[in-house]
Image: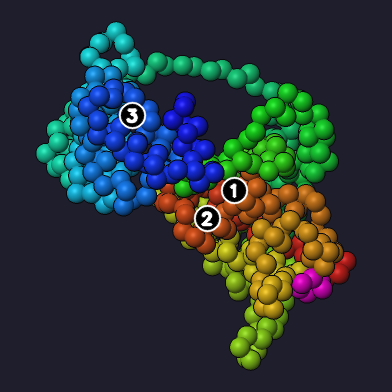
Amino acid sequence: MLAKHTIKLAMNQKYRVEDIKSILTYTLNSTKVEDLTKTRIFLEAKEEKFFRSSEAVNFDERFIALALNSVDNIWKEHNLKLAEYYAQATESEKLKYVYELLGDYKMTLLMADDPSNLYVPFHNEKRCEEAIAYYKIAKCDEKIQNVWLMQNKFKEKKQYIPLRVTIPQNDEKIKFLNAIYESITKSNTEMICVALVTGAGLPYLSNDVLIKYLEEKSESLLMFKSVQEDVNGNHREMKDDASKYEAYNYGMDIVCDLVSDIIVKSCKTKKITTRKIVDFFYTKTMFGVTYCKEIGGKKYEYTWLEQVRFGIESFIKQYNRVIAGKQVNWSQCVDSLSIKFEGILRDMIQINGGVTTKLQNGNTSEITLDEILKMNKSSISKAFYASFNEDDLNLFRYAFSSNGHCLNIRNNVAHSFYLPKHYNWKIALISFLTLIRLAKFAPKEKNL
């Protein structure tokens, strides 16, 4: 503790910094100072980044020696981590050796085989995994092979306790969902499309329900902070409206299951085909209207349907493959529909008088989709609410916002964060439902 305060005081007050560095260096090399004391002092020095790289030459060798002499595993690991830190800082040739020692250390943590202890093989498998990671950096191929063989043996010994959880069925809820299913699937193609586009009759959580949920939320939950983990494993504290989309997420599980069943049945009965879907969007929505845009001094005519047709056709094709029991690939429709959503929404806002650009340092640029969905600019808000409502905005934010519990699909696609495993039927369905919700759009007050 004294070393910690001395180092902090020296750095904050710029007081005798070089003298203290000399004392600490002498301490590290002295045979009269206990090893444990050296480790404690330099853990604090590391925390405060007290030494410059040029001043830490050979520190790694000293901590390697301390680690090899350590009997206690905790202090052995501390010394090895200090050796790693200073070897990296000084670009020492000993760095690979440090990683090899770290791998060796992990292997010393293996527990003795005990058939009566189910935890042992799980623990040992994890230690082997950590050792292999270090050995790979150290390029210890023979050790990697040996540990890998051991790891496989531990995997074979892993046993799981079978647990059965029975959730009582809610008969009223099942009857309610079945009634929606029967009502929509017995309708004609146009009415099925209207239901999918507008969400009418489907059990989306309305904005009023979400507000009531937040008002009734237990005050005890306010003592906790929610943390979000993205697809890359990064963590950040969630925003205040995270609970709103947590509830929305639970509701979307029900919506997705129901809508997926509706689409399957409609595809089987041929009420939904790629041709019928395309005809509906072309004749009944603004997606079939021709627009003109000037890019680079040239004028281009296009329709929104032309932009999204490939994605919609790919989506329906995958459902037909599901019905046929064939292998599916949702990536094409997700990649296409999620990206096209942003461009079409920008067009719609601009048509209704909104501005999707910003001025910064004398330059103009497009604001991000996340910024658009925040509705902070009055021109965007007025243009958006001319055709859409809060329920639509909640769906759009859930699919494409970076808020906690939202899926952030467009961002993950645009930056190639999604791996093949992330492309699943639910992500594809939400991309589809969000995109076709835009078909409610009409200039001014002429809504679908």
Q: Which of 26 and 363 is in front in this view?
A: 26
User: What distance separates the C-alpha of mark 3 from that of mark 2?
Assistant: 43 Å
The amino acid on which the numbered mark 2 sits, given as a three-letter code, is: Asn
Residue 417: percent from the left, percent from the top?
Answer: 47, 54
> In the rendered image, which residue does mark 2 sit on?
412
Q: CB of mark 1 within 8 Å of CB of mark 2? A: yes
Q: Is 88 left, or right, of 441 in this rendering? A: left
Q: Which residue is at a point 25% across and 40% down the rendered structure image?
A: 60
Any part of residue 321 in sight: no
Q: Which of 249 and 140 is in front in this view?
A: 140
> In the rendered image, which residue does mark 3 sit on?
39
Quadrant in the rendering for residue 256: top right
The amino acid on which the numbered mark 1 sits, given as a three-letter code, is: Leu
Quadrant in the rendering for residue 224: top right
Numbered range of the magenta stretch:
350-355
Residue 76: percent from the left, percent from the top?
Answer: 28, 26
Local SS, label 2: helix
> In the rendered image, which residue does mark 1 sit on?
407
Local SS, label 3: helix
The amino acid on which the numbered mark 3 sits, given as a three-letter code, is: Thr
Q: Which residue is at a point 65% across and 64% down the rendered structure image?
A: 368
Q: CB of mark 1 within 8 Å of CB of mark 3? A: no
Q: Which residue is at a point 22% across and 14% down the rendered structure image?
A: 113
User: What distance separates the C-alpha of mark 1 from that of mark 2?
Assistant: 9 Å
Question: Which label sits on residue 441?
Answer: none
